[in-house]
Image: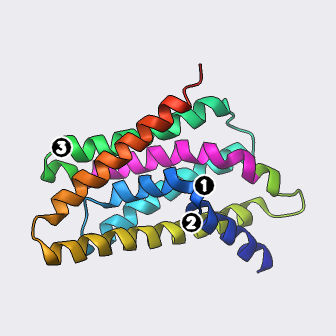
Amino acid sequence: MKDFIFYFKIGWFHIMSTAATDHLFFIAVLAIIYSFADWRKVLVLITAFTIGHAITLFLSVLELINLDIDWVEFLIPCTILVTPMVNLCLKQEQRASHVMQYGIALGFGLIHGLGYANYIRMILSADQQLVWGLLSFNLGLEAGQIVVVCLVLLTVWLSTRMHAKAHLQWIRIVSAAVLLFALKLAIERFPF
């Protein structure tokens, strides 16, 4: 149980720290198009991201995949760029096309998992169970993401109670802010 709590906390703080701003913004921009009524869809969406993240963490820790970290660090903000662009460019009914959103979340989770693989590889010692450590980490990550999603959905819910068109405004504001943030990160992390 001690190992579970240890890795759970690492996963939790992976999302709930100031160093995880890119991750927080990505989760926020994924969730902003939904309302509390869609909580099940959002939960599946966030879980798709976590599954992608878990797959590449596992494969990277086993050294079955090894990509240049400079490219991975560049690709992470590039994936974040896509989501706000989808939010801003597509119509409401297209934006909430869940098959597309799930595919984006899963695919981007695959890339984001590569960014954290070196750190996880270093902290997993030979005498610990790899699967148990990764499972615990990803459960902590998932729990943190659920809290972020709940905060986003709560903000949307409260704002729509005050003004009927506030949700669309939140989508535009959050998407534009995340787009600019991700563009800045992509430029800073360009590998050449």
In x, y percent, where is residue 117? 69, 47
The reply to whether dot 1 and dot 3 touch (C-beta < 8 Å) is no
Q: Check the picture and name the quadrant holding the C terminus.
A: top right
Identify the residue position indicated by label 2 in the image: 16
- Indicate left or right for 159 with 165 as reference: right
The reply to whether dot 3 and dot 2 touch (C-beta < 8 Å) is no
Disc 1 crowd rating (10 Å Cα; few below 14, some 14-19, many 20+) is: few
Q: Is residue 74 magenta?
A: no
What amino acid is at disc 2?
Met
Identify the residue position indicated by label 1 in the image: 19
Disc 2 crowd rating (10 Å Cα; few below 14, some 14-19, many 20+) is: many
The reply to whether dot 2 and dot 1 touch (C-beta < 8 Å) is no
- Whole-angstrom CA distance, mark 2 to mark 1, is 8 Å
Name the residue located 21 percent from the left edge and 50 percent from the top edge: 95
- Whole-angstrom CA distance, mark 1 to mark 3, is 30 Å
- Whole-angstrom CA distance, mark 3 to mark 2, is 30 Å
